[in-house]
Amino acid sequence: MKRFLAFVFAVLALSCSRERPAAWQLSLDEKLAMTHAQSRFSSAGVPRLGIPDLWWSDGPNGVRAEALWDSWAQAGWTSDSCTAYPALTCLAATWNEPLASEMGVCLAEEALYRGKDVLLGPGVNIMRLPTAGRNFEYMGEDPLLAGKMASAYIRGVQSLGVAASVKHFALNNQEKARTRVDVHVSDRALQEIYLPAFRMAVQEGGAWTVMAAYNRIWDLHCSENPRLLTDILRRDWGFDGVVVSDWGAVHSTDAASAGLDVEMGTSTDGLRDNPEATDYSAFHFAEPYKEKLLSGEIPEEVLDTQVSRILRLQERTNLRPGRSHGRFVCPEHSALARKVGEEGIVLLKNSGVLPLDTLKALNILVVGENAIKKMAVGGGSSSLKTKYEITPLEGIREAFPLADVRFERGYVGDAGEVYWGVSAGQDLSDSRTPERLSADAVAASEGADVILFVGGLNKSRNQDREGRDRLSYELPYGQDQVLEALIGTGIPLVYVNVSGNPVAMPWAGRASAIMQAWYLGSEAGEALAAVLSGRVNPSGKIPFSWPSSLADTPFYGSERTCPGILREDGHIMDVYYDEGIFVGYRWYDRAGVEPLFPFGHGLSYTYFEYSGLKASFRGGRLRVSVVVRNIGTKEGKETVQLYVGAPAAGDGEAYERPEKELKAFQKVSLRPGESRKVSFEVPVSGLGYYDETLSRFVTVPGRYSIKAGASAGDIRLNKEIILTER
Ligand code: BGC
């Protein structure tokens, strides 16, 4: 209550600042201090008025360990080891909005316990390049799926008075030259592909903060971009919250008038890499901004607007009366982390070898570094220090108590990742040569009933990690050779891929089963073993298309489209999104190329039949229903995906429409033999394309193709209906 009164007082002080005596006002210095960092992860409150500091924390799938006040180095606390939840690609793969909200609530509880006001996530940048370093933190290639899942997550986080920060606004689709890249994208692709997830996060999720990205667009950095931060975000979408910069993404005081409210993480000459430095006055929003305000070059109203937005954020978070104190690493959080993992794991292929029978005394050979490697640490800012992390091998051993479970390394990847001083506490060094490791794995397979190869990527440099993209689509560390040798033994091989990105799998046709296991967090091994053993029936579906090769995508043919062309200044890199709106399945449909696994694909241990598709336009809405029936013998969950193919408004590229676009989805749980009618309603206004000449979305009358399917490549039912009016 005391804090709330302080807030009311401050708002009054601010809003009355023209009429009230000086003592009632926030001083210029007090206001300025609120707009920039005072430490690595906090910005100042107003101690004189009891307005607390704001504490910001990564995010997005756990609360990051404490860093020192003025440096990235670890504070060395013994009470900051959190629960790691699965990375957001896995969350997206659940297609389960209520589950995303539950995860948001758990994250907020951990944030509150740790005294954090803003959780820096979710990230909703569309997966454009299958090699981009941060895809594992994002939510896939489709704007609707990413937007719906992110909104649900945000509602969960914010329900407890912790702000979410949807990031990175906008077009952070590659890590290569991420602070220097200038993105050239059509307005249509921007509005149809790259912005909708952000818009939904703001309008449906109600995000209280947005993080401006490092990169440039329209020849301006995102944090200094009035069209992005003011015209689109605030005017068009009605955002009333705080825009915070990515750490070090501000380059001038222009950011203030452009719509940025808080500057974080700037390295200045005086502060760069200097753990002793305590002086934040060199931030753009500190002394340089003050000079411009005092000289009248920037009107003080600009600062007042920033401060009132920050106070609104504080009213919603750390000045909110009765905010809970949260809880940390409790059984409920572990259970939820496990559940998200279990629902997000995707069974990509199964020739019948899975699930493995827990009642048999199986002889199981587990191969692969990722079976023993802890993965919550690393990857960049989403790196987590965890209370515990159950590895795949530990989970498998526990789930198959009757089996003889043996392990062979197979390859050495990254023997011990330490990230900013946080170590997984493992020394995985192994002095064997690659040939020896492979030969030992083959020798160990003798007599095995099944080989579980747990491989993929990790969070080391040039893999799934912030700051750099992958250099190749192939599996690293010679895994393909080991896999070929093991497949050559004729023993059924289940390949479990740990990654946030697709990888080349030239041997896919010869593997008995393939499972996508993401970065699953604290409960990784438990969740994986539950699906392998059939205790949990898999129901995840990949949130991106999985190409056989990069040559099947439109991006890698020229430097223009990836990674960009360096300007003559040797600094800025121009990247051209020449493929326009044809990203992901929209591209594969248009090119007539089949990916290895289509967007939305994921198998179950049961089977689902679709029937009775009904579709009509009524009352300004597309109304669709379809009946799904579990025709197998196990209880399971199916995500019914509704795609719509819309007519073109005219001839030519400007009017071309994708063959189909995801417009709704619903996940249902069905017992064997049970059927359910699944209904969807989509406003007709949501079926339009972005007309660049009119600068708005336009829905065209004509013939619409309504498709219900189990994935973008498995459309079960199709119906054509006519829209007569908009
Ligand atoms: C990342 C952000 C992160 C911030 C703070 C930046 O490098 O891009 O996603 O929230 O650091 O750690």
Image (spheres, rainbow, N blue to C red):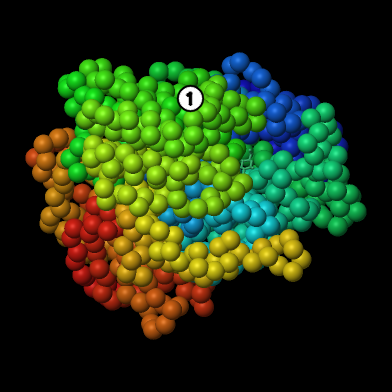
Could you say where residue 696 lies in the image, as x and y percent from the top left?
A: 48, 70
Q: Where is residue 384 in the image (x, y as percent from the top left)?
A: 55, 29
In which image quadrant can residue 262 be found? Answer: top right
Total numbered circles: 1
Residue 512 appears in view: yes
What's the residue at 66%, 20% (across, down)? 76
Q: Quadrant of the C terminus?
A: bottom left
- Which residue is nearer to you in this view: 446 or 680? 446
Res. 633 image quadrant: top left
Q: Please tell me how crowded label 1 is: few (under 14), some (14-19), or many (20+) other residues with Cα within 10 Å.
A: many
Regarding residue 25, the answer to whether it shows in the image is no
Left or right, 10 with respect to 243, comes to right
Q: Which residue is drawn at 63% across and 34% down?
A: 56
The residue located at (35%, 52%) in the rendering is 506
Q: Is residue 267 left or right of residue 290?
A: left
Tell me if 422 is positioned left or right of 639 in this view.
right
Q: Nearer the viewer, residue 654 or 524?
A: 524
Percent coordinates x, y for residue 690 in the rendering: 46, 70
Residue found at x 35% / y 48%: 542
- Quadrant assignment for ligand 1: top right
Query: Residue 38 at x, y = what percent?
Result: 76, 34
Q: In this view, does 157 lie above or below 3?
A: below
Q: In this view, does 717 lie above or below 710?
A: below
Which of the 4 image quadrants contains residue 336? top left
Kind of residue indicated by mark 1: Thr
Which corner quadrant holds the N terminus? Answer: top right
Closer to the camera in the image, 541 or 525: 525
What residue would you read off at disc 1? Answer: 83
Q: What element carries label 1?
A: loop
52 to 457, vertically: above or below = above
Return the residue nearer the eye: 123 or 435: 435
